[in-house]
Image (cartoon, helix red, strand yellow):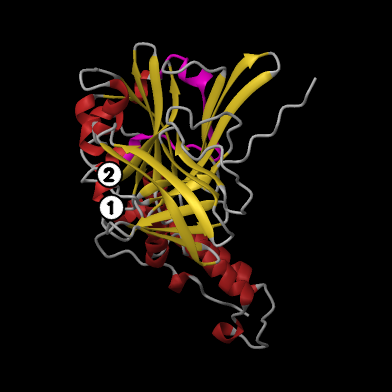
Amino acid sequence: MHVDLTRLAPRPPPNLSANWRKEFGDTQLLQSKTEAISREVSDTPSTGGGTGEAGRGPFFEMVMNAYFYPLTAPGLFMKKYFICLGLIVILFACKDKKATIKAGEITTAADFVAFYPEVPLPHIIADTMLARKPNTTLALDLNTLSKYIPDSVWKKDFGKNASPKFYALGRAKEKEKENYLFTEVTAGNKRIAYLACFNNDNKFLKAMPLLKTGFERYTSAYGMLDSKFQITTYRETKKTADDIVFKRNIYFYDRNGDNFTLIVTEPNEDIIEDVVNPIDTMAATHKYSGDYVEDAKNFISIRDGKNPSEMVFFVHFEKNDGKCNGELKGAARFISPTVAQFVKSDNPCSLEFTFTGSKVTMKENGRCGTFRDIQCFFNGSYAKKKAAKPKAKK
């Protein structure tokens, strides 16, 4: 079988141009290479049993692809195609590597959130970490911070006339939900790590202090955001070698109520110490009797009533830096196994207490303005304080 491959080689135009020579080389050299391959193919048995073009088989196609594709117009197209494809891959690879945003380049809320470095969960901030020298490359000026986090967040702790410094500590995102930003605020020896919550559109929702140093005296403390996006604050004080008191609170961000809700509190100290509790010494044997607390000035105490279908309560709260206060003592009756209702005969005031697990939710159904300030209500959820274990007798 003899196959003439020379007629398949690319033919230059009569006036051989410089571009053609650049792409295909010298015409005589191309022809001589083609003839050599033609002789090699002619010596190869036909896979089709015939001669001439009828004998073209896999070997023939292999030779044609291997030798002529780099030299023919389709080969040039494929060459340019793969070059373009490579450039596109490199372009997307570079795009995936997000450029680090500098503080001076923040112009949008998305920039502000992206400025905070991502951190794995659980993420713990201990009091010893706040004692270290801050990372100045993550410093934020007041003008930038104020655009995205209200000044009221830190001013109620540091005061209106303070001039603190701000540092981005880290960021974690709950899938398809909120971003949690850790920010350090320092003024002298006072330092606070705040946890701020932003929605998917990078809009500020709520913030809370996660850890404070330089305000109160304690032995150790930390704040943590875990992989379930539960927020823990912890502090302990060693009064004597054998007497250590602690307070651990666990919160979660309630997007429906737009608030950080306390779900667990584990103090072994008397946290209701600043307010006189008139029912403190009453019996507390009912399954729902006990103290449900947020802090020392915001709590609900519940004690046994005259019978199992009644309970005695005392509510005290102080909100907005003491600008919104309320206090009420009374007896409520259970209208279902988990709901108790308070109705005052000589007043439109009415409250409802709903118990779920170790939490009570209070709701003001009637007008209780006689017992509170105008701009606040008897509403909120409080976690049950674990009863302190009696100290072992020596």
Q: Which residues are magenta?
A: 113-134
Please name the residue that numbered disc 1 is placed on. 368
In the displayed structure, 260 sits above or below 37; it is above
Element at badge 2?
Answer: loop
Q: Are marks 2 and 1 in contact (CB under 8 Å)?
A: yes
In the displayed structure, 44 sits above or below 308; it is below
Element at badge 1?
Answer: loop
In the displayed structure, 297 sits above or below 189; it is below
Near-viewer residue (13 or 358): 358
Q: CA distance from mark 2 to mark 1?
A: 7 Å
Near-viewer residue (178 or 73): 178
Estimate the x, y position of residue 234 in percent, counting from the top left.
54, 30
Q: Is disc 1 surrounded by few (<14), some (14 to 19) or many (20+) residues within 10 Å?
A: many
Residue 105 showing in the rendered view: no
Image quadrant assignment for residue 215:
top left
Q: Residue at x 59, y 73 (%)?
A: 60
Could you tell me the amino acid type at mark 1? Answer: Cys
Near-viewer residue (382 or 188): 382
Q: Residue at x 71, y 17 (%)?
A: 242
Q: Seen in the image, is 16 located left or right of residue 133?
A: left
Estimate the x, y position of residue 171 in percent, counting from the top left.
42, 38
Q: Residue at x 45, y 35 (%)?
A: 295
Near-viewer residue (35 or 267): 267
Estimate the x, y position of residue 342 in percent, counting from the top left.
40, 58
Q: Residue at x 20, y 36 (%)?
A: 147
Estimate the x, y position of residue 28 in percent, counting from the top left.
42, 57
Please name the residue that numbered disc 2 is placed on. 372
Could you tell me the amino acid type at mark 2? Answer: Arg
Q: Seen in the image, is 37 located left or right of residue 181?
A: right
Circle number at residue 223: none
